[in-house]
């Protein structure tokens, strides 16, 4: 068993609209983080995780998850599965818990500045 206390989480200001608390685990197969979104993330374009599946659970608030093909309203309790290489954005006022498998690494996360559908 491994426990990471919230006070030991690594805080990352991902953008002016989004902050992340990453719970750094030693296990390479999985990682977790909370994201607080106040607006759109990324502010333009899409985020892409090139290596991991991301499972996101809306802990509070509401908003939208957008992809190249659609924008879907989400709210408290909704669970979203993002595939590796899927372009997406968050938009709203919400707290999200995100699990990545395999473990999330900064080099696999990119922002693509493509036109938004």
Image: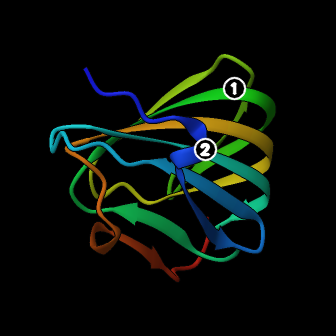
Q: Number of marks in the image? A: 2
Q: Which residue is mark 2?
A: 7
SS class, disc 2: helix
Seen as rendered, the residue at the extreme left is 28
In this rendering, position of residue 23 left or right of residue 62: left
83 or 69, which lies in front? 83
Q: Earlier in the sequence, mark 1 or mark 2?
A: 2
Q: Return the mark for residue 43.
A: none
In this rendering, position of residue 75 left or right of residue 71: right
Identify the residue at horizontal 39%, vertical 64% (top origin): 48
The C terminus, quarter of image:
bottom right
Name above or below for residue 58 compared with residue 12: above
Q: Which residue is mark 1?
A: 59
What's the distance in space between the residues labelled 1 and 2, CA to CA? Answer: 19 Å
Mark 1 crowdedness (10 Å alpha carbons): few <14, some 14-19, many ≥20: some
Residue 45 in the image, given as x and y percentages of width and height:
58, 75
Identify the residue at horizontal 80%, vertical 34% (top origin): 62
Identify the residue at horizontal 68%, vertical 60% (top origin): 19
Residue 21 in the image, given as x and y percentages of width and height:
57, 51
Identify the residue at horizontal 30%, vertical 27% (top origin): 2
Mark 2 crowdedness (10 Å alpha carbons): few <14, some 14-19, many ≥20: few
SS class, disc 1: strand
**Which corner quadrant of the image does residue 116 belong to?**
bottom right
């Amino acid at each position: 068993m491994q426990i990471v206390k919230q006070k030991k989480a690594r805080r990352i200001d991902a953008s002016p609209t989004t902050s992340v608390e990453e719970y750094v685990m030693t296990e390479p197969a999985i990682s977790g983080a909370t994201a607080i979104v106040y607006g759109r993330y990324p502010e333009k374009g899409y985020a892409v995780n090139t290596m991991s599946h991301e499972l996101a659970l809306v802990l509070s608030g509401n908003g939208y998850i957008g992809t190249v093909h659609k924008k879907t309203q989400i709210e408290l309790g909704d669970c979203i599965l993002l595939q590796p290489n899927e372009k997406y954005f968050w938009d709203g006022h919400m707290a999200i818990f995100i699990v990545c498998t395999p473990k999330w690494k900064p080099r696999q996360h990119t922002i693509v500045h493509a036109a938004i559908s």
